[in-house]
């Protein structure tokens, strides 16, 4: 190996070591976002049905009043499920000037976007897609979702308020696709399925829709013993590690299967391991699409999307009483959450924005704050600044309309600058890296220096030898010429 190749190899080796050290010093651990655990469920499956009054499917919500001749399967689900007879999907909250006129489209958009944005049937989803959407809340929280529209989605956006790569609407889509997703190793947290109008009771009888749901949910089995290959026999519903809610949702009461009652009640059914069995909710205030989406949002601690679900939040319109952890038919459990921003590296006198959210209980809610420095405030959102560095305990107390309270606390650190290089371990890596890097650089420099010095010495020795030989030859020649001159003179 030539000296040049040896030197090149040393340089490359040094670079490799330096790069490795730099990666140790400057690489920071990847931030892993904690996936929120739901209050009542961690997964939800919604199957969207159509245009049928409540009593045509469930009677008054009890087994004794349920029309078993036309809906035998759905009636068999009641003892294992919860239902809300007074769900008015035409907009009981009156929080929307459109008030769901023009369902189906408005009902679907209101459910998934928290507001109808004035749409009616035949709209293009792109006209509202720029607004906040529920699936965006899921993705932002690290939760997963998929939505399926059966057989090419013939009703388009009217019955399917989704877009993007997780929305499937090809001609081949069938219940088997949803079941396959539910059987995956990591099923999506949110699954949606839109049947065609030939299956969802829109253009067919209650009996036809009942048979369709039976095949979809349990196959040839029953609600307590679903057949293999059916939705309720899937991993999502049989794995004890999952708390999954099935929500059978009808968009509205009007249609060919009967007339709406005075409250415009639409059918609904809730089934899952955390749902009360045989429970008929007495809730009748403000239960509509906005209450539905707010119930789902508050389960994961999401903020409302728009004015409709915000109105449901402010008025306490949600139906947590259907869950086993919410009591025995009374007011649902009352919980709250607290967030603030910025949450780190907060300088002295910087403005910190605080926000609270209450779930359950009986709305409306009030909020009070204690910032740990002798200051206080009221309101769902507020701001505060600290004029002295330190760690402060912020306490938020939410109170519902019955006087129940729930409290959350957070430690807020102010005025302590973050280490330049993050953690102590990272700083040690830096020090070690600089030491080793310096040693490697010194070794490379000395190696190059000694190599060049030896080459210079060899070259000087060679030149000296050559010069000496040449000088001697010139000297001998001169003496011979001088001797000849002396001889000639003689």
Image (spheres, rainbow, N blue to C red):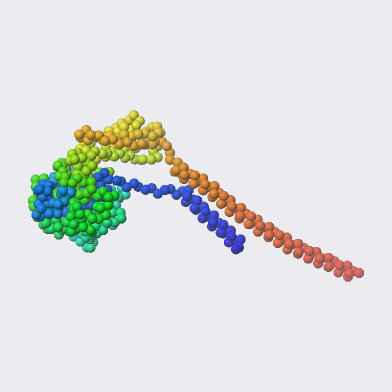
Q: Quadrant of residue 229?
A: bottom left
The answer to whether residue 218 is left or right of residue 143 is left
Q: How many marks?
A: 0
Q: Quadrant of the C terminus?
A: bottom right
Q: Which residue is at 42% across, 37% downward?
A: 416
- Residue 120 position, x and y percent, is 16, 52
Q: Nearer the viewer, residue 340 or 349?
A: 340
User: Among all residues in the image, which is located at the extreme bottom?
Assistant: 488
Which residue is outermost to the top?
A: 374
Residue 252 visible, this orientation? no
From the top left corner, tell me how far across and down residue 66 is, in percent. 10, 50
Q: Measuring 52% from the left and 53% from the top, which residue is drawn there?
A: 17
Query: Residue 296, how many percent across, how many down?
Result: 23, 46
Image-quadrant location for residue 403:
top left
Residue 438 appears in view? yes
- Name the residue: 65% across, 56% down: 453
Q: Nearer the viewer, residue 272 or 57?
A: 272
Depth check: give the residue in front, 445 or 86: 86
Quarter of the rendering occupied by the N terminus = bottom right
Q: Position of residue 233 (x, y in %)?
A: 23, 55
Left or right, 359 with reference to 489: left
Question: Residue 292 versus residue 446: which sits nearer the camera?
Answer: 292
- Residue occupying image coordinates x 13% and y 45%: 86
Is 211 above or below relative to 341?
below
Residue found at the very far front of the displayed protein? 225
């Amino acid at each position: 190996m030539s000296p040049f190749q040896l030197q090149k190899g040393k340089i490359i080796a040094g670079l490799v070591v330096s790069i490795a050290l730099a990666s140790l010093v400057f690489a920071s651990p990847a931030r892993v976002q904690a996936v929120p655990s739901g209050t009542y469920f961690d997964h939800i499956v919604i199957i969207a049905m159509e245009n049928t009054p409540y009593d045509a499917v469930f009677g008054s919500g009890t087994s004794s009043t349920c029309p078993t001749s036309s809906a035998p399967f759905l009636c068999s689900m009641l003892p294992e499920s919860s239902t809300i007879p007074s769900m008015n999907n035409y907009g009981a909250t009156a929080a929307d000037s459109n008030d769901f006129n023009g369902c189906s489209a408005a009902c679907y958009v209101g459910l998934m976007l928290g507001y109808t944005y004035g749409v009616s049937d035949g709209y293009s989803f792109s006209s509202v897609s720029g607004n906040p959407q529920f699936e965006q809340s899921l993705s932002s929280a690290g939760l997963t979702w998929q939505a399926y529209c059966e057989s090419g989605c013939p009703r388009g956006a009217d019955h399917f308020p989704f877009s993007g790569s997780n929305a499937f609407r090809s001609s081949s889509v069938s219940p088997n696709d949803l079941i396959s997703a539910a059987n995956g190793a990591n099923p999506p947290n949110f699954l949606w399925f839109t049947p065609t109008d030939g299956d969802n009771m829109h253009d067919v009888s209650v009996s036809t829709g009942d048979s369709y749901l039976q095949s979809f949910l349990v196959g040839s089995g029953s609600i307590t013993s679903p057949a293999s290959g059916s939705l309720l026999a899937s991993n999502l519903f049989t794995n004890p590690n999952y708390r999954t809610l099935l929500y059978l949702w009808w968009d509205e009461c009007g249609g060919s299967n009967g007339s709406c009652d005075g409250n415009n009640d639409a059918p609904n059914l809730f089934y899952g391991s955390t749902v009360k069995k045989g429970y008929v909710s007495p809730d009748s205030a403000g239960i509509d699409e906005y209450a539905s989406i707010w119930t789902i949002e508050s389960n994961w601690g999401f903020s409302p999307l728009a004015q409709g679900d915000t109105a449901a939040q402010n008025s306490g319109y949600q139906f947590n009483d259907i869950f086993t952890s919410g009591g025995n038919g009374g007011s649902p459990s009352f919980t709250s959450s607290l967030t603030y921003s910025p949450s780190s590296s907060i300088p002295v006198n910087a403005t910190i924005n605080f926000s609270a959210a209450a779930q359950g209980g009986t709305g409306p809610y009030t909020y009070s704050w204690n910032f740990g420095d002798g200051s206080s405030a009221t309101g769902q959102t507020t701001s505060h600044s600290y004029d002295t560095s330190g760690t402060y305990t912020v306490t938020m107390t939410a109170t519902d309309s019955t006087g129940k309270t729930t409290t959350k606390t957070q430690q807020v650190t102010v005025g302590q600058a973050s280490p330049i290089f993050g953690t102590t371990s990272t700083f040690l890596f830096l020090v070690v890296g600089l030491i080793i890097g310096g040693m490697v650089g010194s070794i490379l420099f000395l190696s190059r220096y000694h190599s060049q010095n030896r080459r210079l010495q060899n070259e000087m020795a060679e030149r000296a030898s050559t010069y000496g030989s040449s000088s001697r030859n010139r000297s001998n020649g001169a003496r011979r010429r001088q001797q000849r001159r002396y001889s000639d003179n003689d």
